[in-house]
Amino acid sequence: MTTLLVASTGGHLAELHDLRPRLGVGERRWVTFDSPQSRSLLEGEDVVYVPPATSRDLVGAVRDLVVARKMFRSERYEQVISTGASVAMAFFVPATTAGVPCSYIESATRTRGPSLTGRLAARVPRARLYTQYPAWADDTWRYGGSIFDAFEAEPVADPRPVRKVVVTLGTHERYTFPRLLNHLVTLLPPDWDVLWQVGSTVIDRMPAGARKQVPVSEMRQALAEADVVISHAGVGSALAAMQAGKRALYVPRRKAFGEHVDDHQVEMARELEGRRLVVAREAEEVGLVDIERAAAWSVRASAGVVPFRLAPS
């Protein structure tokens, strides 16, 4: 039978896509939102596109629930695996009613405890819950491994001068990052070649060529050719940079500035800097020396990464 792999677009989908080879699933069907990222990332896969639901979006979650109920009425599935966010609950509820096992893998951004979606998933009868951090594993949340176990950093023997940069601020519709964009527009030399993916962020002095979202295939090429990547502290952006061999300059959004729902990006930046996989800085503190430090290291795949340990059905 088919496994349903369910995730919102952005970091949630990027995590699930990267974890998929370690989950041991066979026949699969993806459930996500329609976006340039999902179209590119899941090209050639069996995909069901559902109505988009943003953070804490009850109306969007109900729309997804309607789709989920129709799917479970028309076909039998082996299991549901999700990395969130609200779309997970939309599918877990009817899946449980239909007797289909559900597994929720909390995002790697949650270094100290579960998200709101994770706390809701814990109320779903018989749902299996997984954390990517052993520090907060307990009788409810099992440690299955970390998506970042697949990477390690090493210094570059002879780093070249920085001339080509990718700036990615994420693609969330609701949360923007003008603090970082305003700072970078002033900081980066005008002769540098910069690809700007700014999402919904708009400032008075928009950089030339700024784009809301870049297709995954084009972004991968740009990341591979870049001397350095400057990114908001989202897990999807970190993974994309690491896969391209880059140690990103990683800047967390802050709740106090209305840049995200909470400060989980601050925790994410600390975690990845502790692994030496990023250079973490606050938005106003980013300097050219930090950019050079990030460019002086590369990231490569770790050898012998173990499977993500899901409990048997």
Image (spheres, rainbow, N blue to C red):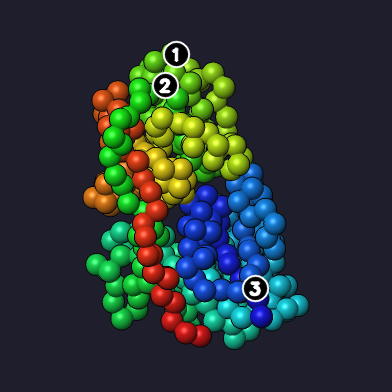
Is disc 2 in contact with disc 1, using a CB cutoff of under 8 Å? yes
Residue at horizontal 63 percent and vertical 84 percent from the top: 98
Towards the viewer: 195 or 154: 154
* Separation (CA) of disc 2 from disc 3: 44 Å
Residue at horizontal 69 percent and vertical 77 percent from the top: 72
* Separation (CA) of disc 1 from disc 3: 49 Å
Towards the viewer: 35 or 303: 303
Q: Is residue 120 left or right of residue 214?
A: left
Q: Is residue 276 left or right of residue 116?
A: left
**Residue on which the image places disc 2:** 163
Asked whether residue 263 is in view, the answer is no
Residue furthest toward the front?
A: 157
Residue 192 lies, with reference to residue 249, above or below; the image says above
Horizontal and vertical percent position of residue 146: 36, 63
Q: Is residue 238 left or right of residue 313?
A: left
**Residue on which the image places disc 3:** 27
Q: Dot 2: within a 10 Å radius of its alpha carbon, few (fewer than 14), some, or many (20 or more) residues?
A: some
Mark 2 or mark 3, earlier in chain = 3
- Total numbered circles: 3
Q: Dot 3: within a 10 Å radius of its alpha carbon, few (fewer than 14), some, or many (20 or more) residues?
A: few
**Residue on which the image places disc 1:** 191
Residue at horizontal 59 percent and vertical 37 percent from the top: 218
Q: Which structural element holds mark 3?
A: loop
Mark 2 or mark 1, earlier in chain = 2
Q: Is residue 88 left or right of residue 181?
A: right
Residue 19 lies, with reference to residue 251, above or below; the image says below
Mark 1 or mark 3, earlier in chain = 3
* Image quarter in which the N terminus is found: bottom right
* Separation (CA) of disc 2 from disc 1: 8 Å
Q: Which structural element holds mark 1?
A: loop
